[in-house]
Amino acid sequence: MNFKPDTIKSEYPFTPKTLDIDGFKLSYLDEGSPGAPALVLVHGNPTWSFYYRKLVVSLKDRYRVIVPDHIGCGLSGKPQDYNYTLDTHIENLTKLLDHLELDTFSMGVHDWGGAIGFGYAVTHPGKIKSLIVFNTAAFVSARIPFRIKICRIPLFGDIAVRGLNAFSKTALMGMATEKKDRFTKEVKAGYLGPYGTWRDRIAIHRFVQDIPLGPKDKSYETLKKIEEGLALFKESPMMIFWGMRDFCFDSVFLEGWTSRFPQASVHRFEDAGHYVVEDAYEKIVPAMREFLEERPSGSCNIALYLVENAKKNPDKTAVTYPSGRDENGKVIYITWTFGQLNNECDRYAKGFQNIGIKKGTRVLLMVQPGFEFIALCFALFKTGAVPVLIDPGMGKSSLLDCVVKAEPEAMVAIPKAHFARLLYRSKFQSIKTFVTVGRRWLWGGHSAEKLKRGFDGPFETVETKSGDPSAILFTTGSTGPPKGVLYEHGMFDAQVRMIRKQYGVDDTDVDLPAFPLFALFSIAMGMGVVIPDMDPTRPASVDPEKIVEEINDNSVTFTFGSPAIWSKVSLHCVEQDIKLPTLKRVLMAGAPVSAEIHERLLNHVLADDAFTFTPFGATESLPVCDIDGHEVLEKTVEMTNKGMGTCVGRPLKGMSVKIIKISDDPIAEWSDSLKVPTGEIGEIAVSGPVVTKQYFHDEAKTRMAKIIDHKTGAVIHRMGDVGYLDGEGRLWFCGRKNHRVVTPGGTLYTIQCEAIFNLHPDVFRTALVGLNDAPNQRPVIIAELNKDANAKDEARISKELLELGAKNPLTDSIHDVLFHPQFPTDIRHNAKIFREKLKDWAQSRIPPD
């Protein structure tokens, strides 16, 4: 080959690398940082890595972009006695990727690259994070343009393809592109240069000869197997870019992709041809960036978001928190910029590293919500350590059990927690390293303040992979003892990207996070964080005046918290005629959100362009779905009041929601036969990039909650909730699976039934419980009355409740009503009803059947 790449340096400013494969040279590009998320681009015929040059230049700042030249193509060797078949090209790609030792990566394919790339993917599905398709096929088709078909005729093909280079030249003359003005002399030289002689064009001809049109063709069976394997990616993130004027891969081939992959995001370019990247690269690059941003691969550490934000906006306020009042009664605020916060985290991280806290070390973190919590969390992330976070609102006994389950190796905590460690020594036996945040007394160990002294330089964040553990979270559930939810860095990353995109967050926003953990996401998204003056373990006791003051003082635009907070704050604002004009998005989760809260906020408190949202999910998978308050008030609340359940919205992009048959047993392997029809109530099962894979050191709970799809490698999480999908793709929540009441006449679901009884004007809330054992349970409705209701009227109210129930076929089998003075609920939200306790209470008042 006489072609010299230096002659096209302005168009191809790369230095290719080579790999010897069985004595033959394979040339490839490997551009970008070795630790960056990887993107592999596979070309077709008659192109080479030159085809992807603009994508490489545009994406290598953030991604490691790898583009091989197939043997016989581009700058690779062009052996004359070589087996140029689909199988061989797949084997060569496999050897290259094995050589590069990539963990996971995204893949883009074009033309013959579709069959070659997917040929690799179907045998390595766990390696593929996402897929990008450019005018190609990876399935059998007998469609072939006449102009290509005649090139398969032995003598004619030899003369046309190898002798005259007609296959390459005609592509540049208009068959493959619509933007002919883009094909300058240097661009044409780039495409044609590697194929300057008869010998150089051997692979071009062999590709044409190897097109598998029927069972007699050599590569037909290989392509057939690849087509069968495409089902492995039916839920994988996929983006399709298609030039609609392609003379070869026309709209029929596009339909072949979209019918197989309805989840794919499709970009059709009416003014682009087969070389779609040439014709539309200015539109493709930003779309690819956005697509790839949502899906981390390879190296991934959540702390890098803080580092990036500190570089981008070092002087922007990152954290604001109240610290007393001045002589005029105004709140005094202390602030830290992103630059200062990052520097503080670096000092802590260096100190931690010096005492042996390193990648993988489990660190029990017990500090008050606020600046120190944020700084210490990000410092631990930087070291690669795994913070263990336990909800302090779950009670002493459960909290100590969580400490034992987590087996922490280090403890970073306030003095109060260290006193507890001394008092309950047996629960903390696994801990060998102690750090006190605040005054250190007689228990020894290290002082956090002293650890960070003397370190002012930047700390190099430890490299972690997307699948490496990032945190272990124990939160208060509504059923059963707390479980250790094992988070990975890639999941944190996916949550940041998903939340930012779903709610339009940018670095001009200011957040008031009532959930302390959400402050970490806010910092990662570049939002300023205002620490609320409240006890996050008891949101129902919040002082609404303080919340209002902090929002207005700091022009807060975003907030995420318990509905218990916003029930109290919205009522206070309505009573005092207070507006919150800067607040644009209010997210409420963790407990049921009443329509009344949406109505007060949207119609009386917030500005006209503001929204309320109720994201649905769990610690193991958040967010899954979302619905805004306008849709609740205008479309779904009426159906909820009729017993249709609570609509929690549509799945977020990238998330999959399935409704499966209700079972109390583990399900080892996914099967489509598990699914129930649209509209039928079943168990909610979800999958996607924010779904956890396991519970920490709890195989039994993991088996009970996780289903493995062995075809795709996906982990499907059983939410423990029941519900159904409607015809519009919305999810309706009907209650917890363990709370269903199974009677001889059918199964009753708590949320559906309780909504009907909650309409009574004297009732604050109700709870459905089932006495005796399934399937012969006796349904009982328990009511907690409003504070102003008269207990003497219980007989009347009971009669009216039964009349309400009798009017609805969902509840006409309920014949028992009991009254409870105050439901047992969780401390945090004062909304999650402990129905098991109510059931025991009811059982003691109604004699067994």
Image (cartoon, grey):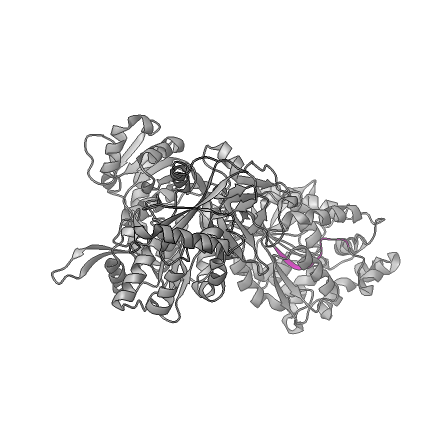
Q: Residue at x 53, y 44 (%)?
A: 717
Q: Nearer the viewer, residue 363 or 454?
A: 363
Please indicate whether residue 416 sits to the left or right of residue 299 in the image.
Answer: left
Quick check: is 134 in the magenta stretch?
yes
Quick check: 111 above or below 380?
A: below
Please indicate whether residue 205 sits to the left or right of residue 525 in the image.
Answer: right
Q: Which residue is drawn at 56% across and 36% down?
A: 666
Q: How many labels does the image show?
A: 0
Q: Is residue 840 visible?
A: yes
Among the 4 quarters of the image, the one containing residue 381: top left
Quick check: 758 above or below 605?
A: above
Q: Residue at x 29, y 66 (%)?
A: 574
Among the 4 quarters of the image, the one containing residue 185: bottom right
Q: What stretch is highlighted in magenta?
A: 132-140
Quick check: is 271 in the magenta stretch?
no
Residue 234, image x, y percentages: 64, 51
Residue 152, image x, y percentages: 84, 57
Question: Which quadrant is the N terminus positioned in?
Answer: bottom right
Please indicate whether residue 815 sits to the left or right of residue 845 in the image.
Answer: right
Q: Is residue 62 visible?
A: no
Residue 684, image x, y percentages: 54, 47
Q: Which of 519 and 748 is in front in this view?
A: 748
Q: Residue furthest left?
A: 327
Q: Nearer the viewer, residue 341 or 71?
A: 341
Please indicate whether residue 1 sits to the left or right of residue 352 in the image.
Answer: right
